[in-house]
Amino acid sequence: MFPIPTELVTLLGTSLIGGIMKLFAMSQEAKRKERLYALQALNTRFAHIEKARKHRDIGFQWTRRVIALLAVLSVIVLPKVVAIWMPDLPVFVGYPEIEEGFMFFTSDVEKIRWVELRGLTLTPLDTHLLSAIIGLYFGGSLAGHNKL
């Protein structure tokens, strides 16, 4: 067998280790640049958000108030007032029900079941919708006045 000179083993070993270290350094530099660009994009995003928060337009605020009030009046209040003035008028409420499939051959299907009610009704849809509208309205107002 031909013996490999130690100088050649040292040359190949150090070249291989040097190449691996160079690749590792390049990888770390790429990760550093990626984090730097992500931070710059995040700072730009926060600057736009802060600019939007500081925007004070009275017309926009009144438009948002009118939309919230009209939604509450038309979806929550109007059906209740009509049910009080005309108690014989039917109110139909739909809610989802799961219809189970046949073993593993068919999957479960969600179907809407409609129920006729009479008089003044308070459905889960009313409470969910009202809480969503109030949460969005007041949450937006709180976020607008928050000093970070």
Image (cartoon, rainbow, N blue to C red):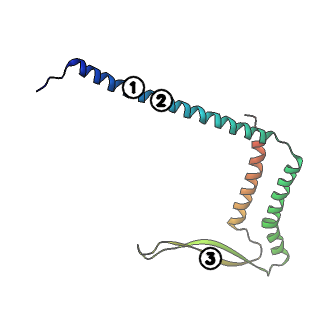
Residue 28 numbered mark, or none = 2
Mark 3 = which residue? Answer: 113
Q: Is label 1 in a helix, a strand or a loop?
A: helix
In the image, residue 55 above or below residue 124: above
Mark 3 secondary-structure assignment: strand
Vertical arrangement, residue 69 with respect to residue 51, above or below: below
Marks 3/2: CA–CA distance? 59 Å
Q: Is residue 8 left or right of residue 145?
A: left
The residues tagged by marks 3 and 1 sit, at their Cα atoms, a distance apart of 66 Å
| Residue at image coords 69%, 61% | 128
Measured from the top left, where is residue 54 in percent x and y? 81, 39
Q: Earlier in the sequence, mark 2 or mark 1?
A: 1
User: Which dot, 2 or 1, sits closer to the camera?
Assistant: 1
Q: Residues within 10 Å of mark 1 (few under 14, many from 20)?
A: few
Which callout, 3 or 1, points at the residue further toward the start of the chain? 1
What numbered label is drawn on residue 21? Answer: 1
The amino acid type found where label 3 is placed reads Arg
What amino acid is at disc 1?
Met
Q: Position of residue 130 (x, y in %)?
A: 74, 59
Residue 66 screen position, x and y as percent: 85, 57
Marks 2,1: beta carbons within 8 A: no
Work out whether 23 lies above or below 83: above
What amino acid does circle 2 point to?
Gln
Residue found 65% across the figure and 37% down from its top: 42
Give the crowd class for mark 2: few <14, some 14-19, many >=20 residues within 10 Å.
few
The answer to whether residue 110 is left or right of residue 83 is: left
Depth order, front residue of 97/141? 141
Left or right: where does residue 106 sit relative to residue 113?
Answer: left
- The mark that comes first in sequence, 3 or 2, is 2
Residue at 81% over, 57% down: 68
Question: Seen from this angle, which residue lies furthest front?
Answer: 2
- Given contact means CB atoms under 8 Å apart, are the residues at marks 3 and 2 in contact? no
